[in-house]
Image (cartoon, coloured by chain):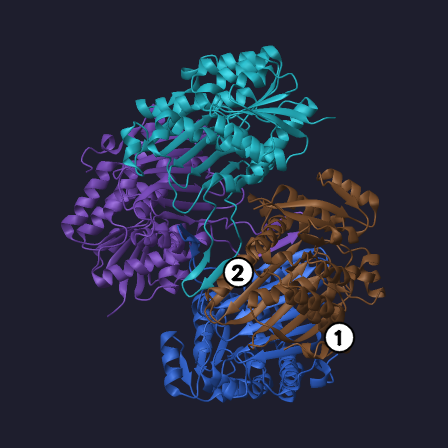
Chain colours: A purple, B cyan, C brown, D blue
Amino acid sequence: MGNIKIGLIGAGRIGRLHAANLRHRVVGAEIVAVADVSPEAAKRCAQELSIPSALTDPRRIMDDPQIDAVFICTSTDTHASLIEQAAGAGKNIFCEKPIALDISAIDRALEAVKREGILLQIGFNRRFDPNFHRAHDLVAEGKIGQPHVLRITSRDSAPPPPEYVKTSGGIFLDMMIHDFDMARYLMQDEVEEVYATGAVLVDPRIGELGDVDTAVVTLRFKSGALGLIDNSRRAVYGYDQRAEVFGEKGTIIVSNPKPDTAVLSDSSGDSGSPLYHFFTDRYTEAYIAEMAAFIAAIEGGKIPLVTGRDGKIPVVMGHAAKLSYEEHRPVRLTEIDPNLV
Amino acid sequence: MGNIKIGLIGAGRIGRLHAANLRHRVVGAEIVAVADVSPEAAKRCAQELSIPSALTDPRRIMDDPQIDAVFICTSTDTHASLIEQAAGAGKNIFCEKPIALDISAIDRALEAVKREGILLQIGFNRRFDPNFHRAHDLVAEGKIGQPHVLRITSRDSAPPPPEYVKTSGGIFLDMMIHDFDMARYLMQDEVEEVYATGAVLVDPRIGELGDVDTAVVTLRFKSGALGLIDNSRRAVYGYDQRAEVFGEKGTIIVSNPKPDTAVLSDSSGDSGSPLYHFFTDRYTEAYIAEMAAFIAAIEGGKIPLVTGRDGKIPVVMGHAAKLSYEEHRPVRLTEIDPNLV
Amino acid sequence: MGNIKIGLIGAGRIGRLHAANLRHRVVGAEIVAVADVSPEAAKRCAQELSIPSALTDPRRIMDDPQIDAVFICTSTDTHASLIEQAAGAGKNIFCEKPIALDISAIDRALEAVKREGILLQIGFNRRFDPNFHRAHDLVAEGKIGQPHVLRITSRDSAPPPPEYVKTSGGIFLDMMIHDFDMARYLMQDEVEEVYATGAVLVDPRIGELGDVDTAVVTLRFKSGALGLIDNSRRAVYGYDQRAEVFGEKGTIIVSNPKPDTAVLSDSSGDSGSPLYHFFTDRYTEAYIAEMAAFIAAIEGGKIPLVTGRDGKIPVVMGHAAKLSYEEHRPVRLTEIDPNLV
Amino acid sequence: MGNIKIGLIGAGRIGRLHAANLRHRVVGAEIVAVADVSPEAAKRCAQELSIPSALTDPRRIMDDPQIDAVFICTSTDTHASLIEQAAGAGKNIFCEKPIALDISAIDRALEAVKREGILLQIGFNRRFDPNFHRAHDLVAEGKIGQPHVLRITSRDSAPPPPEYVKTSGGIFLDMMIHDFDMARYLMQDEVEEVYATGAVLVDPRIGELGDVDTAVVTLRFKSGALGLIDNSRRAVYGYDQRAEVFGEKGTIIVSNPKPDTAVLSDSSGDSGSPLYHFFTDRYTEAYIAEMAAFIAAIEGGKIPLVTGRDGKIPVVMGHAAKLSYEEHRPVRLTEIDPNLV
């Protein structure tokens, strides 16, 4: 079987990361074209990774009959329409999260995917992290029986620049969206209701933009299980991502992997190295596994591990959390999307 | 200086535990009388611990001029009135938590304590646990700067019998009250508002009594900091008590101490012993330190580490959480006690 | 059944520790007399622990018909003869380690014990530590199959004063003797040959006295298994005692228990509290369990967990290690005691 | 600056591993030819990694003027002569360990390297492991002051086939050689004397070939510090590689990194995943860093992190350990190589 031919749209940080992984770390794929609104960015990416064609217009990727799959790594506001175009062109799609901030735009995109029968995988990379993945499998194997309580802590090492915050949709839709996905993935259950509270404790400019930088959300799942998520935009000790699933027969705790295991004990006590500071270091293996899974799904004609629906629901949860925070009351997901079953 | 002479009221499990610690593990105290509504219980306790006098009427302890301090270890509904009596008799008091479920009863008891100028320490033993104590000190020393997020997990190894649940005030006032105290202790801040959610996942009989066995509460502190508490009445792997204080300069995590450090690695992985299963094992050292602190406070004329106010506020928080759960909305503490500043 | 009546000989640090544990922490024992060459020491100990009789002549303990058991906590050079006397008087005996530095003195003492049919327990307290005890049990249960390699690390927090070193028999007989006992206990096997090397790296005065302060010994067991022990007289980070038993089906690692579990993570990394610094803190529970075991052995007429033979063989191993170090060659235990089977 | 042009000799497991890392994970290098005695092996490797030229005769690599550096990944008995040839051709060299089992062959090879002034790096990959590397740096920074005791544990997950053992030089020269290198690297000191003992506990066929499968070695360093190494050919729980450097101001412990951090706690206790089972998984990052360091050394004209001398001394130590085991006595390194200073 020949390589899957890929066209990459968006040669920014995450696009180049995926491209490098596809080039060097994953077998069975080949990037044949890269498009970016900036011709320099496209060219530089093409050069670095020996991609034959550097473009500005994504349309040319859609129209290229040799291309099997399209990677959408552009800014969020373009995702949904590019999905519709790529689906219309019969391409399989890998799209970065979120599909869109607007639910109806997501619905239209997913409708197109369904209609065309192509395969869509959304970029919730943490599902491919070996630590969270192992926790998921232990839950799925019934090791803790019925899950009762989910706990997720997720803290960035440094806050984004205020201009990024402005267009990001805010902490619930930009940052906690990963935890909403993780909640569904680890619990294998759907959330019915959320309650959110937040505070501006890290950077007052984030508050001036109407957002918070510290947030706490509780979840109620359909099964009756409960959940807690806490987020902070700044953990000086590093990029901190932990989870716990507690259930009737036990609990599973995922702690942070460390860059090294050396521990120094001296007269002041024990000390070890700080955590990884960047998501690219923490999730190196996850990003590779995510690419491999996408290629394998295409090759095997299988349902991807992160479907369009998996891409949509965390956005609904993010809007529900935002509304809860704004109105200071618990919010059911059906208030945001009445069609959600 | 002679020993502090103590009269113990209530020779149940916790009364006998304190008495044994005072007898064998703490210097400077001497129990001279024990009273219990059951003459057999009083006699047995007196015999076991060489206490000279076994009584049924606590009044005789109040009236005994040689007695410096009274221990109130009876059922909750008698605490407040016994505090008033003991204060009226000029005795220093150690009283088990909670002072009362009724806020006005607490206020009357604390009023009497204030009026008589005696010393009152409430039995929030976890403040004396070396693990939580160390976390408190690190926060107090400014190691993490301004606290931003508090996380507490507290799970019993087995649910109480339903008849106990009936009179206990429910999970928020009986079990989570310890975590409300811990929240104030670790954060050195006051809570303004709580939001509670709960579920019956462990024992349906608890639900039939109108209580829950699994609960999650979020806290908003005066400083703006946020908190999360989760409780379960049953953790099959043992008595589980953890906390984290995250702040601007770092985070402090307290995990469970283990009965032993041996780890077996074999072809199926690494494995270690389960946690302690009983609070008496987990908090052995805390109970001793609590006694020593009370004796030291009397000897030194110092304010105890757990004051009457520290005894009251967690009850207010418990009522607020209960109301929040019942009315499905965030509740401010001033709704429960408008005088709370 | 009445309490076991005990006469304590030697009211120094370890004698008072055992006495306090017998008094406060163990059920079924009663110290009725304490003897010490210093009348002040005997009196002070008696007063502190409400012991009715304070003596200087141990003979009076031997002659007291109400006394069931004698504790020998004097200086090493008196142990063997006191064992002979106590055995002759028909008393059960708890004797601190080592029985003697001279093998023939040990043999005479053990002969007397055997002849009189009394019970003798030697003070190798570490067997009662819950961590090492758990490792022993896992080995005994066959969890690792046949043991292949034993590793023991044992480091004091500070070196003893040079005058102590002078009479102690040196590092192999004074300090590593505990590890030799642990080796037999954990491996449930006997050592045939040792090879020792050492260095003076901590305190030159120790070297001037002909001893070393840092030592490494390899062991060959009868089963063919191998062992490694390393000792240092000074670990600035605390009292460090670890062990590992590796075998055909796995490995068991015992690490140090910590005074608390709080971990601070800040921009410089993770840090935790130092280890315990004193053996009395590290082995608090072990000393209590040791006393309880001795009392239980008398009450039940059972063979003690640390017999006279268990007291003798580590002394033989200590002499073999010393000879190995001096002659710079491996030494078989039968070179020291040809009768050892 | 153009890429370093590389010729690879030996397309076996380790050769292909380095080649894949050079191709995909390291910037600045380009493999232009691969040679193997098996033309199929050379061809397959060339195809997989897009190497332009597949050869059988290493001479053609030596003679190719465009080639800057030669990788020697053939069987041990050919290393020394290939080094001499490559040095004679003016190529920089990366050579797998050991250079040779014969000391005089090593000396001749190192002489050629010196004479030609080319750069030689030996494949002691563990120096590039982030865990051991961090320990090394902490020692070098003086965090523990003067080192006193080194402990290394090194266990394979499964024994090699007996036919491999036959030509490997035995456990001391094949397996423990890595630990001898680690000893020098971590202690930054030279070993003067070793004492070795061993046993056949894993596979009797290894014993029939005159080798052991379980070995324990003690080291005496020039500084007076002491060391212990234990090896086993089979740890059923995985590939186990740990080290500790203990010194005057503290201790540094390197434990095993784990494939994931998930821990399950249930009624039987805590359990985590097994260790990595293969050195390629455990040392993935180390192999990449090793390649990057070699390329950087060439580019910068710097002394490599693992020199020819670093390649030689562990072989001397291996012979000393073997002799010690055979003659059952401590052996000084100068007995093996009198020229060793």
Whether residue D25 is visible here, answered yes or no, is yes
Q: CA distance from mark 2 to mark 1?
A: 30 Å
Question: Please, what is the three-letter code of the amino acid marked with disc 1?
Answer: Leu
Whether residue A261 is visible here, answered yes or no, is no
Above or below, D310 against B116 in this view is: below
Residue positioned 55% across, 58% down in the render: C133
Closer to the camera in the image, B282 or D139: B282
Mark closer to the chain start, 2 or 1: 2
Q: Circle 1 marks a residue in which chain?
A: C
Left or right side of D294 for A70: left
Question: Please, what is the three-letter code of the amino acid marked with disc 2?
Answer: Ala
Residue positioned 64% across, 53% down in the render: A265
Q: Which residue is mark 1?
A: C323
- The percent position of residue B226, horizontal first and vertical second, equals 46, 30
Which quarter of the figure is the C terminus of chain C placed in? bottom right
- For the residues labelled 2 and 1, say whether their Cβ atoms are less than 8 Å apart: no
Label annotation for residue B106: none
Q: Which residue is mark 2?
A: C135
Left or right side of A274 for A152: left
Picture quadrant where residue A330 is located:
top left
**Do the dots labelled 2 and 1 sit on one chain?**
yes
Above or below, C168 against D190 in this view is: above
**Crowd class of label 2 (few under 14; some 14 to 19; many from 20; radius 10 Å):** many
Picture quadrant where residue C211 is located:
bottom right
